[in-house]
Image (cartoon, rainbow, N blue to C red):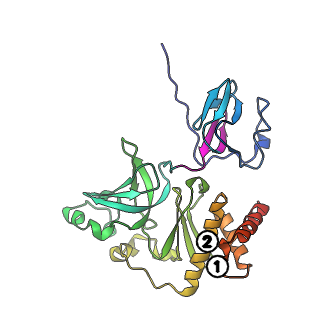
């Protein structure tokens, strides 16, 4: 009689950065480099199948673990996996995501979350007028398009999963909800690292929301006291489609940050708060327009500076 055992999969944010502290039991240490960026490609032999277990993105051939996709090699104890560089977002409960409303259905919205299928935002999972948790009534369902409609952008948290794997979102926090006064940037999800906070405020008056699904929102700075506290909840303002007045200096700062993100993402540099702050400080020292940051030589200089700082 056969018995099947499932092995715990590694967390998406786990990357081995220092291999000097890991004792290898086989003579494959040359493959695992010490720079934390262990890229591989399909067909490359990773290690011995006798000493290690194969995970996602690998297969076994001739007692060797072989990569089946191009991506980053990760190791958790004896489990070897390869995270594909170009892949859809694989959600987990508690993840912060940025999405776009694609469809309004009875008591729910469909949301594009850059995953394998659209997410669902239930009417019962949003803040309604009044700022208190209350029972949803028929009048709320009739006013769904006044909250979110097709094309609206929002930031939400992954709450749970349905039986078919569809992720369920919620915006029951004043930090979540409809997004305005900014610009959306799309990068590969693998470049977004899990941080203590994915809400970042830059000193130039620009706020960043790093969605773990690869969607980044770059917007005008909002003061803390304007987005926290149940007493400050204003349904008309929270669900408004009208942008605030944005001055030219803020528009320029948003464009600068957007271009920096695009340059770093095009060169596969992981995006964190420290990296973005260093990149912005570097850009202020450069001469020329904001659009010049997209030139090849400027991008190479930026990446060299970031890598030099470690």
Residue 16, picture quadrant: top right
The residue indicated by pointer 1 is 290
Residue 303 image position (x, y, % from top left): 73, 64
Residue located 41% across and 48% down the image: 160
Figure check: 45 above or below 228: above
Residue located 59% across and 34% down the image: 55
**Element type where label 2 sits in the image:** helix
Between 111 and 45, the residue placed more toward the observer is 45
Residue 193 visible from this viewpoint: no
Figure check: 129 above or below 133: below
Residue located 32% across and 68% down the image: 147
Residue 177 image position (x, y, % from top left): 41, 66
Residue 49, picture quadrant: top right
Residue positioned most to the left: 138
Q: What residue span does the magenta drawing correspond to? A: 72-87
The residue indicated by pointer 2 is 259
Which of disc 2 and disc 1 is earlier in sequence? 2
Residue 227 visible from this viewpoint: yes
**Element type where label 1 sits in the image:** helix
Between 77 and 2, the residue placed more toward the observer is 2
Determine contact: label 1, label 2, CB under 8 Å: yes
- Residue 78 highlighted magenta (yes or no): yes
Residue located 32% across and 62% down the image: 133
């Amino acid at each position: 009689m056969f018995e099947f055992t499932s092995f715990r999969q590694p967390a998406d944010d786990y990357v081995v950065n220092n291999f000097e502290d890991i004792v290898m039991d086989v003579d494959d240490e040359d493959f695992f480099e010490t720079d934390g960026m262990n890229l591989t490609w399909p067909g490359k032999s990773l290690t011995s199948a006798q000493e290690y277990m194969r995970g996602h993105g690998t297969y076994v051939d001739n007692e060797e673990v072989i990569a089946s996709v191009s991506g980053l090699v990760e190791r958790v104890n004896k489990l070897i996996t390869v995270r594909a560089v170009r892949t859809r977002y694989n959600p987990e409960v508690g993840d912060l995501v940025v999405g776009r409303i694609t469809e309004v259905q009875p008591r729910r919205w469909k949301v594009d979350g850059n995953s394998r299928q659209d997410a669902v935002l239930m009417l019962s999972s949003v803040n309604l007028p009044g700022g208190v948790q209350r029972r949803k009534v028929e009048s709320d369902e009739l006013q769904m398009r006044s909250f979110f409609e097709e094309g609206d952008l929002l930031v939400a948290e992954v709450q749970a999963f349905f039986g078919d794997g569809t992720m369920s979102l919620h915006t029951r926090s004043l930090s979540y909800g409809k997004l305005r006064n900014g610009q959306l940037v799309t990068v590969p999800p693998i470049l977004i690292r899990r941080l203590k906070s994915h809400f970042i405020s830059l000193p130039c008056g620009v706020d960043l929301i790093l969605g773990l699904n690869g969607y980044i929102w770059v917007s005008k700075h909002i003061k803390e006291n304007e987005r926290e506290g149940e007493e400050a909840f204003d349904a008309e303002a929270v669900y408004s489609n009208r942008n605030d007045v944005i001055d030219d200096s803020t528009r320029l700062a948003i464009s600068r940050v957007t271009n920096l993100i695009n340059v770093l993402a095009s060169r596969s540099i992981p995006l964190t708060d420290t990296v973005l702050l260093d990149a912005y400080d570097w850009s202020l020292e450069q001469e020329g327009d904001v659009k010049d940051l997209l030139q090849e030589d400027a991008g190479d200089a930026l990446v060299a500076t970031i890598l030099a700082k470690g």
